[in-house]
Image (tube, rainbow, N blue to C red):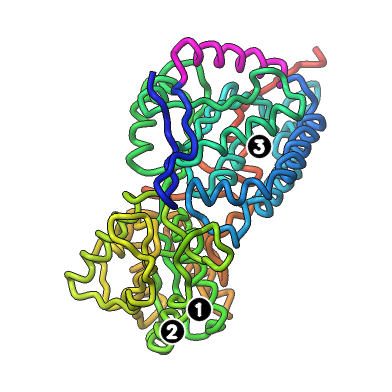
Amino acid sequence: MSDIICISPIDGSEVARRPIATDAEIATILALARQAQQQWSTVPLAERKGRMLAFLDVMRTQNDEVVPELAMQMGRPVRYGGELRSLEERVRGLVELSDEALAPVAHERAGFRRMIKRVPAGVVPVIAPWNYPYLTAVNAIVPARLAGNAVILKHAAQTLLVGDRLQSAMDLVGLPKGLFRTLTLDHSATEKLISSRSVDHVNFTGSVAGVRAVERAAAGTFISLGLELGGKDPAYVRPDADFDFAVEQLVDGAFYNYGQCCCGIERVYVHEQIYDRFVGAFADLTSRYRLGNPLLQDTTLGPMAATRFADTVRAHVDEALARNARPLIDPKQFSADSGGTAYLMPQVLVDVDHSMWVMMEESFGPVVGIMKVSSDQEAVVLMNDSPYGLTASVWTEDAAAAERVGDATATGTVFMNRCDYVDPSLAWTGVKDSGRGLGMSRLGFEALTRSKSFHLRIEH
């Protein structure tokens, strides 16, 4: 038996180690989950909602411990706190949506009682990533549980302790034994679980390469899949934008969480009327970040979650520079940047084009390319010239123009004067290589349930 190990990007120390579950342990857990799910599905929705709110209350008490723990696991600076505020918004939002989302749909006809019910999918594995380890897990766990499912959580190696935290919180709210269980699995064991025909729906958040392995494992089982993948999310800044606000929000959207956000800003298209001014202001604000130990309050950029992720960003920047892109951030301002480590300075590149990796491939780190455009039409063409399609943002004072640009843009979500945000009331979905299926909103519950029709003749 081998172990899954979490190595801190701060100093390379071991944070946590867990043994990979054996086949016998997995079989036992799946049997318990199936039994617990059948019991849970008979529990009234009002009680399920109460248990999820109780889970939230438990998580609220742990935030002071979670913040430094996250910094140790994946490098997010402690000054930004944990994920509790967004977690609370999502849990409460999903609880509020569940009545409408799970209510039977009646189709009245004289002499008959006809309806469509939403019934639980069954046993749902949730494969969660490390970048927002609580939020991405809860996005699937909470609606799955509200819908009457059992959940098996396989969390990322980089954030092993998050799985422990979620397990302990669930254990305290009085759920049937086996209804929620965290499993430590490697890639091979995860694929074996998916292909076992012992589960009913898989929710996966991760890379395109990872989802291909999930789809191969699920082939022929006919289970449903919810797939949230990456992005190369664009922003378009029109000449009528609130200039200072757009700069501030887009710098944050590009570099918050070290750019390790599926919906973070990775490329910006700016109208030629304000391009030079915008580029200068964007670079100036970026240069004010402080790179260093994320456990210190004055640090605004910690290390990336692993050296290999930083190396990917370095490769994208180096390739762009070799093709005559121009960097705007001076390396002398970031002495903590050290080649061969997870510490990496932010970079802003101009004179870029779509032949460069930095404008086409997901960097998932602290680099952004900025291009000049002359019209809405040119911006739309460039925004759509991507294998990804998760979100796009338009910065303007003209809502009608933002909607027109959004209608023409191939993404799952369109923002105006906002970016890098998940609204629990709206469907979270992508197109192209950004995924398939959806989460959040009333529609998100449909992926975690199946339709069951009732056609009852009551007069004959």
Q: Quadrant of the C terminus?
A: top right
| Residue 372 shown left or right of residue 414 in the figure | left
- The residue tagged 3 is 142
First to last magenta residue range = 21-40
Q: How many angstroms separate mark 1 from mark 2 (CA)?
A: 7 Å
- Residue type for callout 1: Val
Q: Which mark is residue 256?
A: none
Circle 3 residues within 10 Å: few <14, some 14–19, many ≥20: many
| Residue 240 shown left or right of residue 67 in the figure | left
| Residue 234 shown left or right of residue 46 in the figure | left
Q: Secondary structure at mark 1?
A: helix
Circle 1 residues within 10 Å: few <14, some 14–19, many ≥20: many
Residue toward you, 31 or 3: 3
Residue 397, picture quadrant: bottom right
Residue 116 in sight: no
Q: Quadrant of the N terminus?
A: top left
Q: Secondary structure at mark 2?
A: helix
- The residue tagged 2 is 278
Circle 2 residues within 10 Å: few <14, some 14–19, many ≥20: many
Q: Main secondary structure of the magenta part?
A: helix
